[in-house]
Amino acid sequence: MQELTAEVVVAGAGPTGLMLANELALAGVDVLVLERMHERTGLSKALNLQPRTAEVLDLRGLLPRARDRSFATVADGHFAVIPVPYTGWDTRHPYQLGIPQAEVEAALEERLAEQGVKVRRGHELTNFVQDADGVTVTAGDLRIRAAYLVGCDGGRSGVRKALNMSFEGIEGQGHGVAADVLFKSTPPNAPTQWRSMTNMVTSQSPGKFIGVIPLAEPNLYRISFGDRLNRPANLRADVTDEEVHQAVTERFGAEVEIAEIRWASRFSDDSRLAETYKVGRVLLAGDAAHTHFPAGGQGLNLGVQDAMNLGWKLAAELNNRAAAGLLDTYESERRTVAKQVLDNIAAQNALIPTTPNQLALRALFRDLTTLPEVQHHLSGMVSGLNIRYATEETHSATGTRLPDFPLPSGNQASTLFHKGNWVLLTKTPTPNPHTEVLVAEVPELPWPDLEKILVRPDGYIANTTGETTAWLT
Ligand SMILES: Cc1cc2nc3c(=O)[nH]c(=O)nc-3n(C[C@H](O)[C@H](O)[C@H](O)COP(=O)(O)OP(=O)(O)OC[C@H]3O[C@@H](n4cnc5c(N)ncnc54)[C@H](O)[C@@H]3O)c2cc1C
């Protein structure tokens, strides 16, 4: 048995674990990442980055490398398969970036390696024991003593289960299948590029849905289909070729020929949320803390943003710079966001009609989505742009994200956050309130009535006074 030490052990090198490890490494934390798989499969469940995730990656200078690995820029999001443009949001990224999950992971792992952290692949966390001072983690031939363990080990999280944590929510009735299908030629009326959610997904008979997204390779499509009312006895059963052929025939007709089914997997429409995100020195993030039906393309995005919220707080705690209770705000902020996502997904599920009355309701809802205010509201939810963390201040800016804007230098304000620091934006010379803060004088702020704003490392506005004492010691 090899004995190691680290400040934080991250279990799982999916998008959440990799983002978290990057954030911790950036803050100088000694982080060790365990991943049970020997290598990435290269297969992707998620296919998109939402606008807020694009902004979050931009705060760390990571967006260009995600863009290099992307295959599409999609003008709108969707809510229950009804397209919703990102209307009225002050963002430089009012689009979904079409990028396979495997490419997001590759980009994050590449940056992590540049920071000197190598993922320990082929190392499955099998056990951990925590005490007042730390956690002892066992993974294969490794025994690691760390101050904290973060379970980023996905929906079936062994870390969460070992904590005996309740993982309650809505038990769905239905299921879905995601399959990457290569056709012999382009199916009739199928889009050849993913530019919009319009016409991407078509509801069929009651309770059924089918979505078609063109991928990077010619004639390769993600076909997502399912039934809101029925699920197989075994949700882990292999997807049969016949199921995929049947869905394709329903959507495109019997004459369409499949060359290859590259990958197919089932998913459920259950929604679950961990009772707490922190038990002593063990925390949960990403799918380990919340799972849901992949409606609207939100799960990976939620996980990456969990990591962005947790990273700087955990680093401040380890560096003895966190004000009392700072780490607890990870749960109060991010569990609230996850609950909101689970609620919007429940609403989306209800909008896939199974009865004539629901069909009429959906038609009415679709009409409403042509109103700019409704588009703004719905796209704010699925994009993550509407997140507002609770604060004591009442100004509408506090708790919201800082919209990116150009600085007199010609750089964007987002570049001030590349090192994971706090930023005090001020119109008048102001003394630096804390060593972790970068003070930047700016001629204007996105809120003309404000003189200064203190922005957290994750890009959310802490306050309009510039006081750090509620957050940092
Ligand atoms: C069909 C489908 C389509 C989806 N589409 C989208 C989409 O378009 N947009 C979107 O945002 N989301 C989508 N999602 C959701 C998204 O895929 C997940 O939310 C995302 O994978 C969560 O990332 P994660 O890092 O938290 O967990 P995971 O990606 O599950 O990663 C967990 C990692 O932990 C490792 N691991 C597990 N146990 C251990 C252990 N004991 N020790 C060490 N390592 C361990 C696993 O091997 C894995 O690498 C979709 C999901 C499905 C099922």
Image: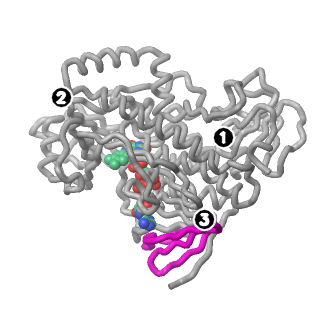
Q: What element carries label 2?
A: loop
Q: Can residue 323 be seen in the rendering of this structure?
A: yes
Instruction: Report the Cα–Cα distance between label 2 and label 1.
Output: 43 Å
The foreground one among 215 and 163 is 163
Instruction: Report the Cα–Cα distance between label 2 and label 3.
Output: 48 Å
Residue 265: x and y in percent read 26, 52
Q: Which residue is drawn at 84% across and 30% down?
A: 427
Is 189 part of what is drawn in magenta?
A: no
Closer mark to the observer between disc 1 and disc 3: 3
As drawn, which residue projects farthest toward the left?
A: 254
Identify the image's colour scheme: rainbow, by chain, secondary structure or one colour.
one colour
Label 1: which residue? Answer: 459
Label 3: which residue? Answer: 8
Q: Can residue 102 be seen in the rendering of this structure?
A: no
Does the numbered disc 3 mark a residue whose Cβ is under 8 Å from ligand 1? no
Q: What stretch is highlighted in magenta?
A: 119-147
Q: Main secondary structure of the magenta part?
A: strand
Residue 326: x and y in percent read 68, 48
Q: How crowded is mark 1: few (under 14 residues within 10 Å), some or many (20 or more)?
A: many
Q: What residue type is labelled 3?
A: Val
Q: Residue at x 46, y 57 (%)?
A: 14
Q: Residue 207 carries which label?
A: none
Sequence-first disc among 2 and 1: 2
Quadrant in the picture for residue 160: bottom left
Label 2: which residue? Answer: 206
Quadrant in the picture for residue 98: top left
Instruction: Report the Cα–Cα distance between label 1 and label 3.
Output: 23 Å
Q: What element carries label 3?
A: strand
